[in-house]
Image (spheres, rainbow, N blue to C red):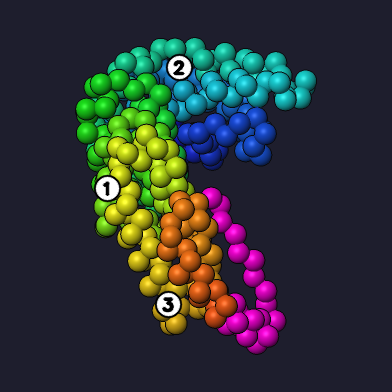
């Protein structure tokens, strides 16, 4: 059992393993729960041995590590709750101080596969924290990055198990080691990212590297090959008339912007499709009365 299981059982309260900031709607709710559950949290604290050596003790560590970040929200507290929250926060801080951060890092280095593979078994008691735990561990390890963490195998395993999560953090992972760029752009990983609608994000990453001369020189072959792969993939889907015209035009728009931003000469050939696609869009609008807007986030 961990602190989240205990609180759910005792109070039916749900907590996050992430602090979303003082302006998030959930922050006020969580602060109220900290105040209301303070005695129960202290009761649970008596059972902790403060050694991070399992998933449950890791969740305990993460809970209290995240909890003390709510101190930032003191500035937005209503006066009538301020003293109660300060008391609860002092207790949370005292509990967290008894953990050893080095032990948590050591546990994660040795057991990162168990953490990445973590999946709650009991559907009736699920807390749905798998993603938040994965996110917490990623942030924790990258914020305390050292050679032991870099060489542990954590990042390689993360990319092999959850390429979408990894790609959502591509900028951070690239700062760890640029060698991971080639893993992101392996064909099977690109297909998985396409499946989860990351085409625009991939294009943005390519734009960032392509327009940085120093970075582009280091990764020229990889980037050029990936550009060609993206072009062929997108071009074929645009031409495929079995795809809905709205999807085809959306892909045309994305590819056009992408080629323009990387100064790729194939843009001129692509532009020849615009009139034909626009006519088909107009026919669809006349038929359905629905209009659409197209934009890119890069």
Task: Verify whether residue 12 appears in magenta.
Answer: no
Mark 2 vs mark 1, CA separation in Å: 48 Å
Mark 3 vs mark 1, CA separation in Å: 27 Å
Element at label 1: helix
- Which quadrant would residue 266 be assigned to in this image? bottom left
- The one nearer the camera, 193 or 283, is 283
Q: Is residue 229 above or below residue 210?
A: below
Element at label 3: helix
Mark 3 or mark 2: whose residue is earlier in sequence: 2
- Reading the image, the residue beneath label 2 is 96
- Which quadrant would residue 195 be assigned to in this image? bottom left
Q: Quadrant of the N terminus?
A: top left
Horizontally, residue 232 falls left or right of residue 25, namely left
Mark 3 vs mark 2, CA separation in Å: 58 Å
Query: What residue lies at 43% left-to-right and 82% top-to-bottom?
Result: 242
Task: Verify whether residue 290 appears in magenta.
Answer: yes
| Residue 81 position within the rendered picture, expressed as x and y whole percent measured from the top left | 72, 22
**Residue 159 visible here:** no
Please provide the residue range marked out in magenta: 278-298
Question: Which of the two discs, 2 and 1, sits closer to the camera?
Answer: 1
| Residue 291 position within the rendered picture, expressed as x and y whole percent measured from the top left | 67, 74
Query: What residue lies at 54% left-to-right and 64% top-to-bottom?
Result: 253
Query: What residue lies at 64% left-to-right and 16% top-to-bottom?
Result: 86
- Reading the image, the residue beneath label 1 is 221
Mark 3 surroundings: few (<14), some (14-19) or many (≥20) residues within 10 A: some
| Residue 176 position within the rendered picture, expressed as x and y whole percent measured from the top left | 33, 30
Mark 3 or mark 1: whose residue is earlier in sequence: 1
Mark 2 surroundings: few (<14), some (14-19) or many (≥20) residues within 10 A: many
Horizontally, residue 180 falls left or right of residue 89, namely left
- Reading the image, the residue beneath label 3 is 239
Q: Is residue 266 above or below residue 95?
A: below
Instruction: Confirm or deny contact between disc 3 and disc 2 (CB under 8 A).
Output: no
């Amino acid at each position: 059992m961990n602190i989240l299981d205990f609180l759910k059982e005792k109070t039916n309260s749900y907590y996050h393993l992430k602090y979303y900031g003082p302006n998030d709607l959930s922050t006020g709710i969580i602060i109220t729960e900290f105040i209301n559950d303070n005695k129960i949290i202290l009761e649970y604290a008596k059972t902790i041995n403060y050694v991070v050596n399992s998933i449950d003790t890791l969740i305990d560590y993460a809970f209290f590590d995240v909890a003390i970040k709510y101190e930032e929200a003191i500035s937005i507290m209503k006066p009538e709750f301020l003293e109660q929250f300060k008391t609860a926060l002092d207790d949370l801080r005292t509990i967290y101080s008894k953990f050893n951060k080095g032990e948590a890092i050591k546990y994660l280095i040795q057991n990162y596969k168990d953490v990445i593979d973590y999946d709650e078994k009991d559907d009736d008691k699920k807390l749905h924290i798998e993603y938040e735990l994965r996110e917490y561990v990623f942030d924790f390890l990258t914020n305390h990055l050292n050679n032991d963490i870099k060489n542990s195998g954590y990042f390689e395993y993360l990319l092999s198990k959850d390429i979408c999560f990894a790609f959502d953090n591509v900028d951070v992972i690239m700062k760890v080691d640029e060698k991971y760029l080639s893993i992101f752009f392996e064909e099977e990983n690109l297909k998985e990212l396409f499946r989860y609608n990351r085409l625009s994000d991939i294009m943005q990453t390519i734009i960032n590297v392509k327009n940085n001369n120093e970075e582009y020189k280091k990764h020229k072959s990889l980037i050029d090959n990936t550009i060609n792969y993206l072009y062929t993939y997108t071009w074929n889907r645009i031409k495929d008339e079995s795809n809905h015209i709205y999807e085809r035009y959306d892909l045309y728009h994305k590819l056009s912007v992408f080629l323009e931003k990387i100064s790729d000469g194939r843009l001129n050939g692509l532009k020849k499709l615009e009139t034909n696609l626009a006519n088909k869009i107009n026919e669809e609008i006349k038929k359905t009365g629905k209009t659409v807007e197209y934009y890119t986030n890069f």
